[in-house]
Image: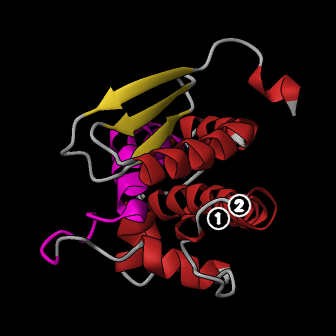
Amino acid sequence: MAAKFRGRLEFVCIPDTSPFKSHWDFHGRSIELRCGLGAIDLVQSIVFELINAYHNDDFQQVDAEASAGRLSRDEYARRMEEIEYKTYTKYIAVMRWGIANCKWSRRMDELNGANVPSFDDFRKAQNAPTDPQDPDSSHTGFHRTQWDEFYRQAYERRRRAQSPPSGGEEFFAELGNTRAAKEVFT
């Protein structure tokens, strides 16, 4: 695990208006923490984002695929949530270990002893909008808007490059693709 953290790791304070308590910036190798977090939220956020940092290679892989235009908006969001789910399951294990072995406060266990949700249930919760008027006002929505900003052009460029050149095939298809229609117009 030590090899994953070579180099500098920074902590950055983000405005209280951020929709998230914390965020792992896999490009800048920094943990962004919302200003004004209480002690328990701060510790939980740091632990969670350190585990996200551990998965940095996974984030970089998804970034590379999206940058090459190989992931659609929804595929990108799903892949990012899959990594977050891996982080979440490890995070719950760390919190429960700390409660059992280090006498951490039971308030550290977000699930209060309940089972870790399945990926599908986790994804549904992550996709629940905080603003009913904005379907992208969720954690998954954040990933979709990231795709819009950083990867949409690469995806559209790749799709255009893979589309067959138009040589009138669409026109003949509209005419019923008959041999007679082709003979008249060629």
Judge the density around disc 1: few (<14), some (14-19), many (≥20) Cα neighbours within 10 Å: many
Q: Is residue 186 above or below residue 126?
A: above
What label sits on residue 103 in the rendered view? Answer: 2
Q: Secondary structure at mark 1?
A: helix
Judge the density around disc 2: few (<14), some (14-19), many (≥20) Cα neighbours within 10 Å: few
Residue 119: image x %, image y %?
A: 65, 78
Of residues 17 and 161, the one drawn nearer to the viewer in this rendering: 17
Of residues 49 and 159, the one drawn nearer to the viewer in this rendering: 49
Magenta-tinted stretch? 132-159
Mark 2 to mark 1 CA distance (whole Å): 26 Å
Residue 169: image x %, image y %?
A: 46, 63
Residue 66 is drawn in which quadrant?
top right
Left-right relation of 46 to 54: left
Q: Is residue 178 above or below residue 42?
A: below
What label sits on residue 41 in the rendered view? Answer: none
What residue sits right under mark 1 in the picture? 85
Identify the image quadrant of the N terminus. Answer: top right
